[in-house]
Image (cartoon, rainbow, N blue to C red):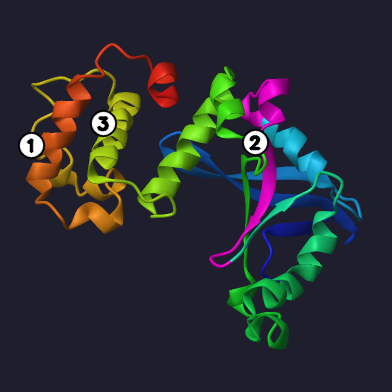
């Protein structure tokens, strides 16, 4: 299991002492990896990890019910039920890859980097958009916003140019607050090579960087006065 994001640490006596697991979240405008530490045990239930992540993120009981732990690969994503053991699932991961992606490498070479995956704490698959929109838990909304932003930028959720501009403007509002004409000028994004963090890659080459910035700043001005919480809900 050399490719899984779980490490077992031994104590001075050489016996297993603790478990370190790396969990990724899309925390608003940033991707964040956290390392959770648990006393060593032969099983580690997904529920144990979810409870700790919800606590760290500051989610309410309502918000926690809207999130789950996932095993994520470039070609496969599986949501983990709360009662399942992470060690058992990790051992089965190559078989899941072979079953759902039809990759021979997954089984023939278990130690291949192809079998690597990431644990991500994110939105529960069966939660409807209507339920998500009714959520008022600020910590959960931050996670939902971050996940939606990531999905748009990577092309998982294709969007129009107008929608891309709107999302970029909202991102400016959440990151920098209200528009400042003396600060937010052409070159603010393109000059720091950060424009690609605001525009989906499949739209990026359709306009000059300066034109993107002009359109983003025009829309950005309309969100002045919106709080971070409200901007993420829009």
* Quadrant of the frame with the N terminus: bottom right
Instruction: Look at the picture and state if 219 lies above or below 94.
Output: above
Neighbours of disc 1 within 10 Å: few (<14), some (14-19), many (20+): some
| Residue picked out by circle 1 | 186
Within the image, what quadrant is residue 206 found in? bottom left
Neighbours of disc 3 within 10 Å: few (<14), some (14-19), many (20+): many
Name the residue at 87% across, 50% down. Answer: 40
Within the image, what quadrant is residue 221 found in? top left
Closer mark to the observer between disc 3 and disc 1: 3
The answer to whether residue 8 shows anywhere in this view is: yes
Q: CA distance from mark 3 to mark 2?
A: 27 Å
| Residue picked out by circle 2 | 127
Name the residue at 13% across, 36% down. Answer: 215
175 relative to 203 in the view: left or right? right
Instruction: Look at the picture and state if 18 lies above or below 218.
Output: below
Q: Tell me, yes or no, whether the two marked residues, 2 and 1, touch with CB atoms within 8 Å.
A: no
Neighbours of disc 2 within 10 Å: few (<14), some (14-19), many (20+): few
Residue 99 screen position, x and y as percent: 72, 75
Circle count: 3
Task: Of the two numbered discs 2 and 1 on the same chain, state the one appearing first in sequence.
Answer: 2
| Residue picked out by circle 3 | 169
Task: Of the two numbered discs 3 and 2 on the same chain, state the one appearing first in sequence.
Answer: 2
Residue 145 screen position, x and y as percent: 46, 33
Q: CA distance from mark 3 to mark 1?
A: 14 Å
Highlighted range, magenta: 55-75
* Quadrant of the frame with the C terminus: top left
- Identify the element where label 3 is drawn: helix
């Amino acid at each position: 299991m050399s490719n899984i994001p779980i490490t077992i640490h031994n104590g001075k006596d050489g016996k297993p002492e603790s478990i370190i697991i790396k969990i990724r979240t899309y925390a608003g405008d940033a991707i964040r990896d956290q390392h959770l530490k648990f006393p060593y045990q032969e099983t580690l239930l997904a529920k144990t990890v979810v409870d700790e992540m919800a606590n760290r993120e500051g989610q309410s009981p309502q918000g926690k019910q809207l999130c789950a732990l996932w095993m994520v690969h470039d070609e496969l994503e599986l949501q983990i039920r709360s009662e399942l053991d992470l060690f058992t699932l990790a051992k089965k991961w190559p078989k899941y890859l072979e079953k759902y992606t039809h990759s021979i490498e997954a089984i023939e070479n278990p130690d291949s980097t192809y079998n690597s995956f990431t644990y991500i704490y994110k939105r529960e698959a069966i939660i409807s958009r209507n339920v998500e929109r009714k959520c008022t838990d600020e910590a959960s909304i931050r996670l939902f916003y971050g996940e939606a932003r990531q999905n748009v930028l990577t092309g998982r959720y294709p969007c129009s140019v107008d929608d891309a501009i709107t999302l970029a403007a909202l991102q400016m509002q959440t990151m920098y607050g209200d528009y400042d004409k003396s600060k937010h000028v052409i070159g603010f994004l393109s000059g720091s090579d950060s424009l690609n963090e605001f525009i989906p890659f499949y739209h990026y080459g359709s306009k000059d960087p300066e034109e993107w910035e002009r359109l983003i700043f025009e829309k950005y001005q309309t969100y002045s006065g919106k709080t971070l919480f409200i901007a993420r809900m829009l």
